[in-house]
Image (cartoon, helix red, strand yellow):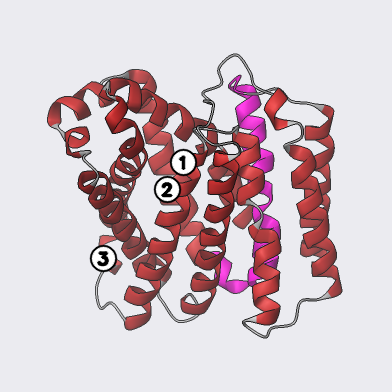
Amino acid sequence: MLALCCLLWGISFPLAQRSTAMMEKTAGSDQLATVVRPAFNGLRFVVAALVYLVLTFPQQRRFSRSDIVGGASVGVFFTLGLFLQLIGLRYTTPSISAFLTALSVVFAPLAQACVLKRKVSGTLWLSVILAAGGTALLSWPGADNLGANSYVEKPPIPLLGEMLTIIASVMFTLQILALDRYGQSANPIRLTFIMFAVCGILSVLVSCTCGGTSLFSPAMLHTLLTNAHFAWMFVVLVLLSSVIAMHLMNRYQPLIAPAAATVIYCLEPVFATAYSGLLGAEAITLFTLVGGGIILLAVLLIAKA
């Protein structure tokens, strides 16, 4: 199920990059460029929360403390991570973004051993090393892999996109740890709804506070959603990469150790790079194939263990 999550998340890298670029172009103001990312997240997750509520309404009652605190904690860390990741995607390729996001594969086992005081087996450490190395190969040499349909811009500060994405990886690691903590007792359906709601509301508030209120105007939304190219990407991001993927994550990740989960999540950059190549955002190289193969080996070691 977590591997299926990665398949659904992988498409979000190139689609989120393209969608936010289209939203910036539609906004038509340099001042609004910096708030388009949280505005896009807000629109995406408010819609995801509403769709999820409709689909699971009979179970959205009798919320426990774990449901609320767990959903809010996971939602806050996820919001911060996704916001930083989306800004970083403006200045780096989808494969490099996916690689740096996957650094949680290193952070999580360290936290599991040092903070949670839970043993990390030798096989798991080997999988962590393989997954980290494979992901590095997967994105190498990312700067030279730009395709004709790339949306990468030159950063105002060298390596700005990479630095922001590393911080995002720390936030995603905290998200994984929070889900491991509260997912043991929370109802995954109620936790997921709270997570979507928190993510959507926080993103909208950040955008509006920074001057992005006009991005939610009826005229703006009508222009975007009547654009067939934007509309199909938005539907995929909401239904597949959000509603289905996050439900599966919140349901199944608590069943395994955080360190093992992060190794499986390294499949995300494999799929992200494959989708990005198919959409013409970057080229598929020998490094891509070898790196993806090593990550698959790491995941198979986890499955065998």
Residue shown at 29%/41% (left/top)?
Answer: 39
Residue 106 placement: quadrant:
bottom right
Do labels 2 and 1 touch, CB within 8 Å? yes
**Residue at image location 34% in from the left, 31% down from the top:** 33
**Which residue in the protein does label 1 denote?**
86
SS category of the residue bearing label 3:
helix
Membership of 258 in magenta stretch: yes
The reply to whether the magenta stretch includes residue 297 is no
Residue found 35% across the figure and 76% down from its top = 69
Identify whether 195 is placed above or below 46.
below
Residue farthest along the front direction in this orientation: 157
Compared to 210, does 67 lie above or below? below
Range covered by the magenta-colored residues? 252-281
Picture quadrant where residue 122 is located: bottom right
Read off the residue under disc 3.
58
Quick one: SS at disc 1? Answer: helix
